[in-house]
Image: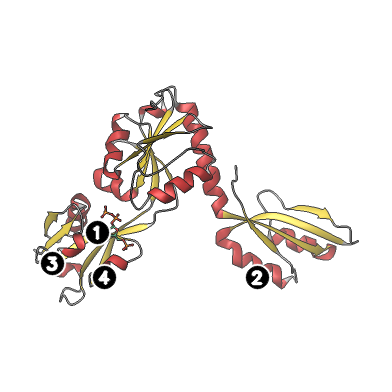
Amino acid sequence: MANINNKNLKLAIQKQGRLTDETLDFLRKSGLEFESYSQRLFSSCRNFPLEILYVRDNDIPNYVASGTVDLGILGQNVLNEKKPKVKKLLNLEYGFCSLIVAVPKESEIKDIKTLRNKTIATSYPKSTKKFFNDNNIPVKVVSISGSVEITPALGISQAIVDLVSTGSTLALNDLEILTKVYDSEAVLIANKDALRNGKKDLLEKLTTRFKGVLSAKDYKYIMMNVPEAVLPKIKQIIPGLKSPTVSPLAKEGWFSVQTVIKEDTFWETIEKLKQVRVSGIIVLPIEKMII
Ligand code: PRP
């Protein structure tokens, strides 16, 4: 059996669960090359001094806090619930879900105040107690490790606090959302000492790669051919990161304009370009962007 190289950075990720596939995808988009299959306990990257360890997501906070591993990728929900002494480095913009309060559809309970003195089942007891304390609603919290959605039907609880992403599990169990406790997504956390010791440089190199993938997601690369008279207006509409690349075409008086635009202003920018009669716009995704 191959051994873990302790000089390398160690990153713990969820072995099997909601974040696993997207985490592997994110690591590969960051240019890391490694083997992964479900029986594997860890993988060594071929092109970066990194060991990836596959563990249960609930164990990741402890592994990172104790320094067993340097880094972890897990849901913000686990951080909120366990409050480990770790440093959060990045939001990774995938694995979006929410912790919510839900009740059976036919229940008379239609707002959280009516839950006073009722029993709530959850795998998130700390988040649940905090939420109801903050709202000054006394409730009884029952900790359940899984299949929380079944507990109202079993008569164990009148409401649940659980994660929801697509909402299909709630719908299947005839439950409806009363309110949201908090939103969650995948995050990168680090051991506090790893940020100071000999692995600091490696850690910075890795987070630069991660940030490059995240920035690229926020931008699109666009190209268009425009007549010279329109160029000044185009430069105002799409300033680019510094300024757009403008190069002359073989056809006299025409130019090719290339630049990046932010995803969140994408359609607004396209509308403005159409108003100045630009057509034939080509839009491309960006794989990585180092700003
Ligand atoms: C969560 C949650 C629900 C399900 C909701 O479980 O407990 O069962 O996801 O997702 P949906 O809204 O897309 O149907 P998770 O997959 O995190 O596994 P767990 O049971 O180990 O908590």
Please state the horizontal and vertical placement of residue 285, each as a whole percent of the image.
61, 55
Question: In terms of sequence position, does the residue under pointer 3 or pointer 4 come before the other?
Answer: 3
Q: CA distance from mark 4 to mark 1?
A: 14 Å
Query: Could you tell me residue 174's position as x and y percent?
Result: 23, 73
Which-is-in-front pick, marks 3 and 4? 4
Give the foreground label among 2 and 3.
3
268 lies left or right of 181? right
Q: Is mark 1 within 8 Å of ligand 1?
A: yes
Q: Do residues under tags 1 and 2 come within 8 Å of each other at their CB atoms?
A: no
Mark number for residue 271? 2
Q: Amino acid at mark 2?
A: Glu
Q: In the shown orientation, is residue 242 left or right of residue 15?
A: right
Q: Quadrant of ligand 1?
A: bottom left
Q: Which badge, 4 or 1, is on the more N-terminal residue?
A: 1
Between disc 4 and disc 1, the foreground one is 4
- Front-most of 220 and 152? 152
Question: Quarter-wise, where is residue 103 in the image?
Answer: bottom left
Read off the residue under disc 4: 172
- Is tag 4's residue or tag 2's residue first in the polypeptide sequence? 4
Q: Which residue is mark 1?
A: 162
Three-letter code for the amino acid on which mark 3 is drawn: Gln
Cα gap from disc 3 to disc 4, whole angstroms: 17 Å
Instruction: Give the secondary structure at mark 4.
Output: helix
Instruction: Provide residue 160's location: percent of width, then percent of height.
Output: 19, 62
Q: Which is closer to the viewer, label 4 or label 2?
A: 4
Which residue is the site of mark 3?
158
Check mark 4 vs ligand 1: CB closer than 8 Å? yes or no.
yes
Circle 2 — which element? helix
Q: Mark on residue 59?
A: none
Query: For the residue marked with disc 4, what is the amino acid?
Result: Leu
